[in-house]
Amino acid sequence: MTSFAEKWRPVVGWEGLYEVSNWGRIKGLARWSKHWRGGKRLFKERILKLSKTAGGYVMAKLRANDRVEEKYVHSLVLTAFVGFRPAGMECCHGDGIRTN
């Protein structure tokens, strides 16, 4: 089995808020954010809990203030480490396993 180091890159469009690793983990960075009752709240750095879709793909829910988006983890990894995929193309899992 080949072992490789985990590398982190900013999530495109969420720079300064989230990072994605080449292992497919998502990390929320430490930051101050608006609290729903007013004022500000400190969010500590943490690894997000991911969910699976009915089709077996892994998703992450990204939040910042009033913005909430669910993103496929494989797309976040591709965009951060390779770049945007061309229009009409799909990102594939090299081993065919949707959770990788």
Image (cartoon, helix red, strand yellow):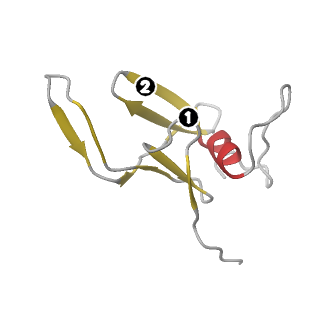
N-terminal-most mark, 1 or 2: 1
Q: Which residue is mark 2?
A: 68
Residue at figure coordinates x 46%, y 45% from the top left? 18
Residue at figure coordinates x 40%, y 32% from the top left? 63
Q: Where in the figure is residue 46, as x and y percent of width and height? A: 35, 53
Q: Where in the figure is residue 56, as x and y percent of width and height? A: 63, 38
Q: Where in the figure is residue 93, as x and y percent of width and height? A: 76, 48
Q: Which residue is mark 1?
A: 13
Separation of marks 1 and 2 at Cα, in angstroms: 12 Å
The quadrant in which residue 74 appears is top right
Q: Is residue 61 above or below residue 36?
A: below
**Tag nearer the camera, 1 or 2:** 1
Q: Classify residue 3 as left or right of residue 20.
A: right
The quadrant in which residue 95 appears is bottom right
Residue at figure coordinates x 56%, y 34% from the top left? 13
What is the crowding at mark 1: few (fewer than 14 residues within 10 Å), some, or many (at least 20)? few
